[in-house]
Each structure stands twice: as C-alpha cells, then as structure tokens.
Image: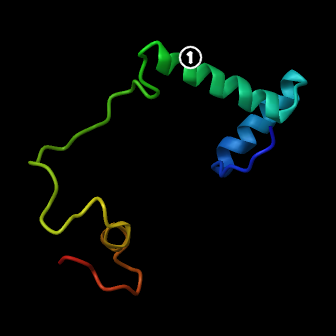
Amino acid sequence: MRTTVNIHDALLQEAKELAVRTGRPLGQVVDDALTLLLSRVHEGVPPNPAPLPTYGGSGLQPGVDLEDKEALSALLDPDEDRPRAGL
C-alpha cells in the first residue's frame, strides 16, 4: 500500500543507507522496522525501554497546559515573537 508519512531526516537517511547496504528497497526496510517495533509492543516490551532522566520537582509548573500546543511552543521557544501564554 502506498502512503505518505513524515520521517525525521536523519532517520530516513539511516534507513536509506541500510537499504543500500542490504540490497533491499527502502519500503522493505521500513516494513521490517515497523514489524519489529510492533512485535515488541505486542510482547509487552516498551518501544523505548531506556529510562528517561528526571530532575525532581512536583509535576507541571503553573501555567503549563499540555493540551495547548501553542502555549507549549511559546514556553519552549521564548525567542519567538509570540506572547507567552499563561505566564
């Protein structure tokens, strides 16, 4: 089936290089990667088992709304010419 997806540039480049090294089409490399990921998920293995670092604190800071992507973007990139929502 043909479809369109957004893939990070570096990840796509790596997949293309693997396709060339193994003599397979890029679509087959992507199929194999998805098959591997989905089989791990079905087996109960988290997709990214590496622990994420935490730095203390008690949850979200005041004014942070994870449902408001514009406000989050403003908080994460204050150099943009946008008003800082919620603060």
The relative height of residue 4 versus residue 35 in the rendered view (above or below) is below
Q: Residue at x 88, y 25 (%)?
A: 24
Q: Residue furthest right?
A: 23
Q: Residue at x 56, y 23 (%)?
A: 38
Residue 69 pos. (x, y %)? 37, 66
Residue 39 pos. (x, y %)? 56, 17
Q: Is residue 43 left or right of residue 22?
A: left
- Residue at disc 1, secondary structure: helix
Residue 36 pos. (x, y %)? 61, 20
Q: Residue at x 63, y 49 (%)?
A: 8
- Mark 1, residues whose alpha carbon is within 10 Å: few (<14), some, or many (≥20)? few
Residue 7 pos. (x, y %)? 65, 48
Q: Is residue 41 left or right of residue 56?
A: right
Q: Residue furthest left?
A: 58
The amino acid on which the numbered mark 1 sits, given as a three-letter code, is: Ser
Identify residue for label 1: 39
The relative height of residue 14 versus residue 45 in the rendered view (above or below) is below
| Displayed quadrant of residue 12 | top right
